[in-house]
Image (cartoon, grey):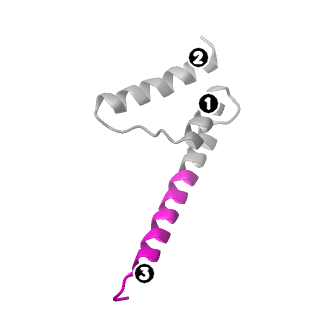
Amino acid sequence: MTGRQRRKEVFEAARDKAEALGLKFEDDDTYLSAVERWVDGEISAAELRAEYQRLIEEREKERRIQRFVRHCLRSDA
């Protein structure tokens, strides 16, 4: 088994286990692209984790901005 095959198996097993437990697995195109780069051996697991962390941080930043805008637009603000 090649390293690529093993990494693909690891990813698929994690995704399948999450789905079997009824959990929604990450389906963001940016994340899945990073997973493909990891499977292909272009980036390390640490780099994959860092990319996912950036994605999560960006989502949180967007949520905070949306809450702030909603707050500013309230008529009693």
Please give the range of residues in magenta. 53-77
Magenta region, mostly helix, strand or loop?
helix
Extreme left residue here? 21
- Identify the amino acid type marked 2: Gln
- Identify the amino acid type marked 3: Leu
Q: Nearer the viewer, residue 40 or 59?
A: 59
Q: Residue at x 68, y 28 (%)?
A: 41
Q: Which residue is mark 3?
A: 73
Q: Earlier in the sequence, mark 3 or mark 1?
A: 1
Is 73 left or right of 4, judged from the image as shown?
A: left
Mark 2 or 3: in front is 3
Q: Quadrant of the C terminus?
A: bottom left
Q: Residue at x 41, y 37 (%)?
A: 25
Residue 62 position, x and y percent, is: 51, 63
Q: Residue at x 46, y 76 (%)?
A: 69
Residues at discs 2 and 3 in contact (Cβ within 8 Å):
no
- Identify the amino acid type marked 1: Glu
Q: Secondary structure at mark 1?
A: helix
In 3D space, how far apart are the residues under numbered discs 3 and 1 (Cα atoms)?
41 Å
Is 16 left or right of 10, judged from the image as shown?
A: left
Q: Is residue 72 magenta?
A: yes
Please identify the quarter of the rendering in which residue 74 is found.
bottom left
Binning the other alpha carbons within 10 Å of mark 2 as few (below 14), some (14 to 19) or many (20 upward) gives few
In 3D space, how far apart are the residues under numbered discs 1 and 2 (Cα atoms)?
12 Å
Extreme front residue here? 75
Binning the other alpha carbons within 10 Å of mark 3 as few (below 14), some (14 to 19) or many (20 upward) gives few
Q: Quadrant of the N terminus?
A: top right
The dot on residue 36 is: 1
Residues at discs 1 and 2 in contact (Cβ within 8 Å):
no
The dot on residue 5 is: 2
Question: Does residue 15 lie above or below 54 as drawn?
Answer: above
Question: Does residue 4 lie above or below 34 as drawn?
Answer: above
